[in-house]
Image (cartoon, rainbow, N blue to C red):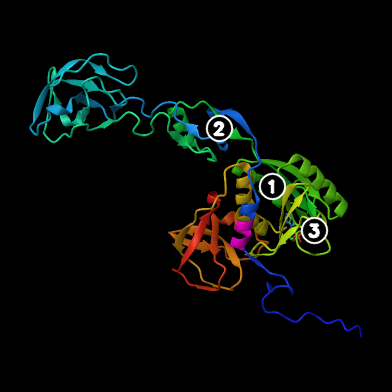
Amino acid sequence: MSGLKPPPLRDDCFALPAGVDWVPVDQALARLRERLHPVMGQETCNITRALGRILAEPVIAARANPPLANTAVDGYGFAGVVLKGQDLVLPLVEGRAAAGPRYQGHVPQGHAIQILTGAALPEGVDTVIMQEDVTLGSGEIAFRAGVKPRANTRNAGEDIAAGEVALDAGRVVTPADLALMAAVGADEIQVHLPLKVAVISTGDELVEPGQPAGEGQIYDANRPMLTGLLHQFGYHPIDMGIVPDTSDDLRRTLNEAAAKADVILTSGGASAGDEDHVSALLNEAGAMAEWRVALKPGRPIALGVWQGTPVFGLPGNPVAALVCTLIFARPAMGVMAGSGWHEPQGFTLPAAFEKHKKPGRREYLRARVRDGRAEVFASEGSGRISGLSWADGLVELGDGAMEIRPGDPVRFIPFGNF
Ligand code: AMP
Ligand code: MG
């Protein structure tokens, strides 16, 4: 008899191996946040090509928006001082004020001028009455009392004054930002260089999409997913391919990735098994901080540094790989890329499901919103990739125990908010 005994049975498969402390998600995130810093240089970029880029300097308004006081409607402009609470008849001056070059003449007090939306207010005009609210006679207009001085006009600079900050550094440029930058006269702006992120899949079982897959082989689902996410974040993915489960191959690929990229994402091989070379190599490099994060799905995640380059050793499971990327790698990469730590905005919705949740770990469920309620995918199996496609986001359940019934409030985070 060898004396070898099976481990005592546990009713919780996430019970800690002896002597290991699980790091709560918030603590892990706080540590990441304090350790990382921006690494990216900058370049000049024309605003026409700036969509999705990260501002390296604030954009200052070269010009006010609007540059001149103007009219918000089509109608007739005059000096508001004539309004004394009675119905009015005002003679019209010759010509009209339209968007484009400003009307040159002066509109005398007690007179009105036809004016079209966007036209700068001519001299003598500070109030506009809508076309629909007047009766047009020959060379004059009549309208009812009740028009307020300055009605239907916009002040110069009421949106943004010249010299004001239009957009802050760190901002990821949206289509609306392009409109704002154009309006305030921005042209060439300073942006960060895109973060370069190497993506490595590990596993002897993996084959490239498009290749024949033998028995025991599966297609590499993580690389296309991670590469797609990186594109959406505005980063520059570097495809390092599939690496078999040998230390030498992985070491060589990590060396190459560290030389090319600012961050490395690996998937698979991150736990402590025989073929888990990612965690083994990071350990060997001496920079390994293997964080046993109390997170489901997400065990295991390995974080380390390879030749000065941060490595996120994501779980092999596509569902866990996605969740870990969104929860950990995303905000961390934001700091490095120059857009800062990003807290995903979620919102509280009534649950359309019930669940008994164990204490001691944060959980993320594949979820979507229907009829104002959060539905979760029928299976929590972390191999169910179809559930990721089914979902529009994640329901986040806090670290404690929970008994969730339909109608109870839960936090939903859309994928697009990460
Ligand atoms: P590992 O962390 O390497 O033990 O992998 C955990 C599970 O995820 C295993 O079932 C792997 O086959 C699977 N897996 C690992 N990498 C990938 C990948 N790139 N695409 C799809 N499944 C993967
Ligand atoms: Mg593996």
Taking the image in four quarters, ligand 1 sits in the one at: bottom right
Task: Confirm whether the magenta stretch covers residue 376.
Answer: no
The tag earlier along the polypeptide, 3 or 1, is: 1
Task: Confirm whether the magenta stretch covers residue 26.
Answer: yes
Residue, x 45% and y 69% (percent of image)? 408
In the displayed image of the protein, which residue is found farthest to the left?
A: 86
Residue, x 54% and y 55% (percent of image)? 393
Pointer 1 residue: 224
SS category of the residue bearing label 1 = helix
Q: 10 Å neighbourhood of mark 1: few (<14), some, or many (≥20)?
A: few
SS category of the residue bearing label 2 = loop
Q: Quadrant of residue 8?
A: bottom right
Q: Which mark is residue 283?
A: 3
Residue, x 59% and y 61% (percent of image)? 26
Amino acid of disc 2: Ala
Pointer 2 residue: 50
- The mark closer to the camera, 2 or 3, is 3
The tag earlier along the polypeptide, 2 or 1, is: 2
What span is in magenta?
25-31
The tag earlier along the polypeptide, 2 or 3, is: 2
Q: Nearer the viewer, residue 80 or 402?
A: 80
Amino acid of disc 1: Pro
Measured in 3D between alpha carbons, the distance from the residue under mark 2 to the one under mark 3, in whole angstroms, is 40 Å
